[in-house]
Image: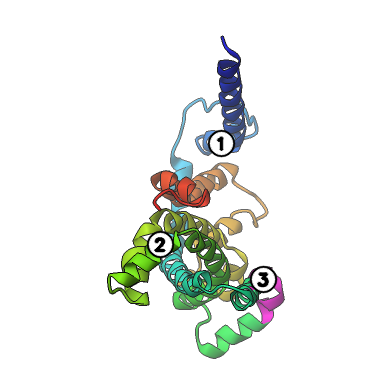
Amino acid sequence: MTTEQSASWLRHGFALAIGLLMAIPILVAINTSLKTPAEVLDVLSLPASPTFANYAEAWNRLGATFANSLMITVPGVALSVLVGAIAAYPLAQIRGRTGFVIYMFLLTGMLVPYQIVQIPLFSLMRNLGLYNSIPGMWLVHVAYGVPICTFFMRNFFASVPRSMFEAAMLDGCGHAQYFYKVLLPASGSGLAALSVIQSRAIWNDLLFAMTLTSNDSARPVTVALNALTSGFVVQHGTLMAATIITIGPILLAYLLFQRAFVAGVLGGSSK
């Protein structure tokens, strides 16, 4: 075996070990979710008779809020990615100190901790009549998602060859036509990667969900999942089943857009 082959085996073995290490918590959660309450205490043992009763109970507790999370996440991601891309386009075109100053000003939104604005945000949403409403959650997640979306897409757009823009202008495209018909289709991997990142952030949000919602008409699934841990007696089998149900959509989104996600994070492969 050559040195190059040995190094390849070593890299693959190391990656496999890291993957198995990262998978252990999920495997333990799945194993626990299939156990009866009497079997839960023996964490590493396999269930004697796997049961899906925990999943039925978890769905009874999460079902309504699961739909709320979908209605919050899908429009929230679409709006924040679209607004961020629109804001990123002129910033990628502006050269010199002016563009840099505007860019850094927008990025300050990423440095503001959520806890600082929690109380004034609560008052604002009450005054706007958007407290405990799904549109209100859209507004909050778009406002906080625009800085990171702008940051991500601005760097992605800046890597697009200038010759593409010049060729589009020579063909008679205006800025809007170039953005919607040329730049966005060419940035599919970046948009997919950003959508996965933003989906995870919105779906997993707990702070805004607990602050700006009060009942199951708008409450997302993270609040219901947190409620499973707040009782005097915690049903660990039900809790683990609820956790698996909760992470399912984000895991599925990542698996479906895995190639585009990796290409987008690495800077794009479609240009």
Mark number for residue 163?
2
Which residue occupies the extreme right position in the image? Answer: 116
> Helix or strand or loop: what does disc 2 sit on?
helix
Q: Position of residue 88 (x, y in %)?
A: 50, 70
- Reply above or below: 160 against 21: below
- Reply above or below: 110 against 120: above
Mark number for residue 114?
3
Q: Position of residue 181 (x, y in %)?
A: 31, 67
Q: Earlier in the sequence, mark 3 or mark 1?
A: 1
Camera-near label (3 vs 2) is 2
Camera-near label (3 vs 1) is 3
Residue drawn at point x = 63 percent, y = 31 percent: 43
CA neighbours of label 1 inside 10 A, class few (<14), some (14 to 19), many (20+): many
Q: Which residue is mark 1?
A: 32
The magenta segment is 109-119
Q: Based on the picture, tell me whether residue 76 belongs to the magenta stretch.
A: no
- Reply above or below: 4 against 265: above
Q: Earlier in the sequence, mark 2 or mark 1?
A: 1
Question: Mark 3 to mark 2: distance in Å?
Answer: 41 Å
Question: Would residue 244 be seen by someone viewing this image from the given angle?
Answer: yes
Give whichever of 121, 156 is nearer the camera: 156
Horizontal side of residue 74 vs 156, given as left or right: left
Amino acid tagged 2: Ser
Amino acid tagged 3: Tyr
Q: Which quadrant of the rendered structure holds the N terminus?
A: top right
Horizontal side of residue 220 vs 184, given as left or right: right
Dominant SS type (magenta): helix
